[in-house]
Amino acid sequence: MKNKFDIGLSSKINKFCDKFSLLNLSKSENTDLLFEDFANYVIASNLSEEELTNLKSVSTNKAQDIDGIAIIINDTLITEESDLEKIGKNEKIKLKIAFIQSTTQKSCDKSKLNTFVDGIINFLLEVRQIEPFSSIYHKLMDEEGAYIDLLDDTPLVYGYFVYGVSSHIITEDEISALKNKITSRTELRNIIKLGDIYIYYAEQLKDKYDAIDGFNYAEIKLDKNVQLSPVDKIDFSILSTIKFAELKKILLTKDGKLKEQIFVENIRSFIGNTGVNQNIRETLDDNKTSIYFSFLNNGITIMCDSINKHPVKENTFKLMHPRIINGCQTTHILFDKFKENAENIDNIDIVAKIIATKDNELKKKIVLAANNQNSIDQDLQALNSFHEHIENYFIGNSSFSQKLYFERLRGQYSDVVPPHSKIGIETLARVYISVFMREPHKMKTNALTKIEEYQKDKKIFVETTPAEDYYLCAILYYYLQSFILNNALTLKTKTIDMHLLMVCNIVMEKKGMTNTTKKISYLSNKDNALSLFNIANNRLNKQSELFEKRGLYSSPKTHRLLEDIKTEEIDDAIE
């Protein structure tokens, strides 16, 4: 197939394909869809200042006028309605909504631009439903809901129209006319504010793609530092003091928000106004004691994949994939003080231990050692023995052709590709509850609450459950992502994903695969897996009530699906 893109853009698209295990431009049967995914990935990654790893999470599932929607709250990408649970009870919300549309047409079809803007308007007026984004938007903007009063300002809306091939320049007057279509709608006044409409061509897209790597590292200056002697598996480590003005380069987004992803997942989450935290605040509040902060506070521990000393700049280091593994409380309080008065805190010195290693076993030991002095840490879900048992089971398992990873600590497998070959605690819990407990509808709105409840009630992640069951969940999740990414599977709606995994498991059971070992053996063949997913998907498409408004969120409708399937014969294509 003749390549329609320029050499530079083609190179970056092919690198993107390698990362996500997609067929590259020379092999892909649909380069338009491939470019759509690439554009969504580039725009969403730049908006959230974090590389997008769940590629289809912003896709509108082939909606004609909008390819992607990125809903961003306080610089964090929101892709599921249940993500809203992560917003603090009294946390002020800064909301941005970005709409993305791409084209590979060489000619400049301005009607596509107008259709794109019309699609944005219809979405914002809630005339057009694109799930799960419409449900998230409605919940945020509901005047009687829990979030409307948390909005810090009028939500900002952006449009990104991306040309992969055309060099025709859209004039400023033409862009102004497009903007006016939105700003002139009286129904949207005081509800949203138009940030801008951007037209990207190949050069802008290439620049934005190159910027993504920058989100994975930080360059900081450490005026006072001592390099420790290198040891096996730790090539570089530093003891230092770091001024908050430099620490900000690791902690904050361009908009001055705290990067949620900088903290190792589930490790000493911020626990509020404890006595220790109050002492930290009091030290910073008093000008007489704040100069002694580095002597009165234990400081922070940062772990990263690598540390490189700048070849020219004195005392300057580049950290790749930095993560704060100890000092969450200190960091949050420093951030609170920064919000109160940015200038007053810039010169505060913080003691920092910075360790570089790529060894995953050593990473776990360092995280545990950095936190084990605190009694609260003994109950941390990310480090409990059963999670470690699951992780070790994944590491030692060779029954599946693709190596799978249980990432119980954020950034633990930062270099693993494709990204969907690793699965985190929350996603694994959602799949397990959907597949084995047959409650996919509960994973839509309040998934985090339900997961916490089930952990407390010893229904998930308990030692009596075989680790093999969680491995099966990871296989099903891997195939779901892989088939969708490679256009081998098309879902009627994105929100049916957990129902689909549940039905895949039921179909295997109805065909005599009564234990997990048999299921994993069957799924070790990719053709078997694709046949299974298509059978399950076709069966779900017949259950019309699931596709009614919020049908996939309904317990009665899920139970009726289960009752109907119980009495049915399953397609003999699966053997």
Image: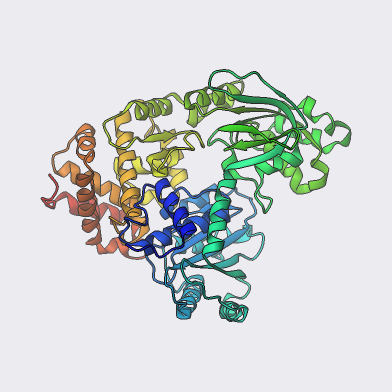
Q: Residue at x 40, y 65 (%)?
A: 4
Q: Residue at x 46, y 26 (%)?
A: 384
In the image, residue 209 lies at what x, y percent?
A: 53, 54
Horizontal side of residue 497 vs 216, given as left or right: left
Asked whether residue 273 appears in the rendered view, the answer is no
Q: How is the image coloured?
A: rainbow
Question: Which quadrant of the view contains residue 135?
Answer: bottom left
Q: Is residue 243 left or right of residue 205?
A: right
The one nearer the camera, 383 or 60, is 60
Q: Is residue 112 above or below residue 275?
A: below
Return the x and y of residue 566 as percentages of the image width and height: 17, 49
Which quarter shows the N terminus? bottom left
Q: In this picture, is 81 found above or below 317?
A: below
Left or right: 449 as drawn, with respect to 226: left
Q: Is residue 339 left or right of residue 371?
A: right
Image coords of residue 132 (percent x, y): 43, 59
* Figure disc tally: 0
Q: Residue 263 sits in which quadrant? A: top right
Residue 499 placed where, x, y %? 30, 51
Going 55% across and 50% down the picture, which residue do you hit? 212
Quadrant in the picture for the C terminus: top left
- Quarter of the figure with residue 57: bottom left
Q: Is residue 12 visible?
A: yes
Q: Nearer the viewer, residue 234 or 566?
A: 234
